[in-house]
Amino acid sequence: MKLILAIVQDKDSSLLSSEFIDNNIRATKLSTTGGFLKSGNTTFLIGIDDERVPEVLQIIKDTSQTREQFMTPPVNLDTTSDSTMAYPVEVQVGGATVFVLPVDAFHRF
């Protein structure tokens, strides 16, 4: 038994949730916030048998797309820094961060 923690961008969460339902994968969905861009994320908690882990990872990989996004860096009040830092920069967002952890015991009541 494994516990999969999958952190995906909110834009991908509805499709991923539907894929889990279609493939009979039980998941708990949590709203979370990313630290870097302070944007909305969704974290899925999935308890799954060892032999189904590759299937779940493939579903996550197929539905969680990376994309380019512009962000404006925080304002720096230091007058010695380069003034070009106030312009928006393009960053890559999306995709998924996934942790697969062993589970010692699993109970459903």
Image (cartoon, rainbow, N blue to C red):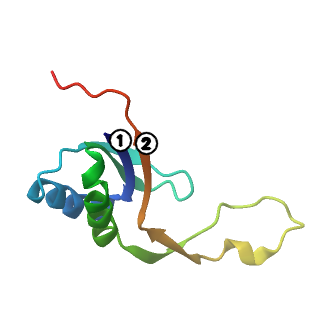
How many C-alpha atoms fall within 10 Å of the one at disc 1: few (<14), some, or many (≥20)? some
The residue under the point 72% across, 73% down is 85
Of residue 66 and residue 61, the one placed in the foreground of this image is 61
Residue ID for mark 1: 3
Q: Residue furthest front?
A: 51
The residue under the point 69% across, 61% down is 75
Q: Quadrant of residue 36?
A: bottom right
Please say if the residues under marks 2 and 1 sit with CB atoms less than 8 Å apart.
yes
Classify 12 as above or below 46: below
The residue under the point 64% across, 77% down is 87
Q: Quadrant of residue 32?
A: top left
Residue ID for mark 2: 101
**Residue 106 in picture, x, y percent from top left:** 27, 28
**Residue 64 in picture, x, y percent from top left:** 33, 67
Q: Earlier in the sequence, mark 2 or mark 1?
A: 1
Label 2: which secondary element:
strand
Label 1: which secondary element:
strand
- 48 left or right of 83 in image: left
Q: Quadrant of the N terminus?
A: top left
Amino acid tagged 1: Leu
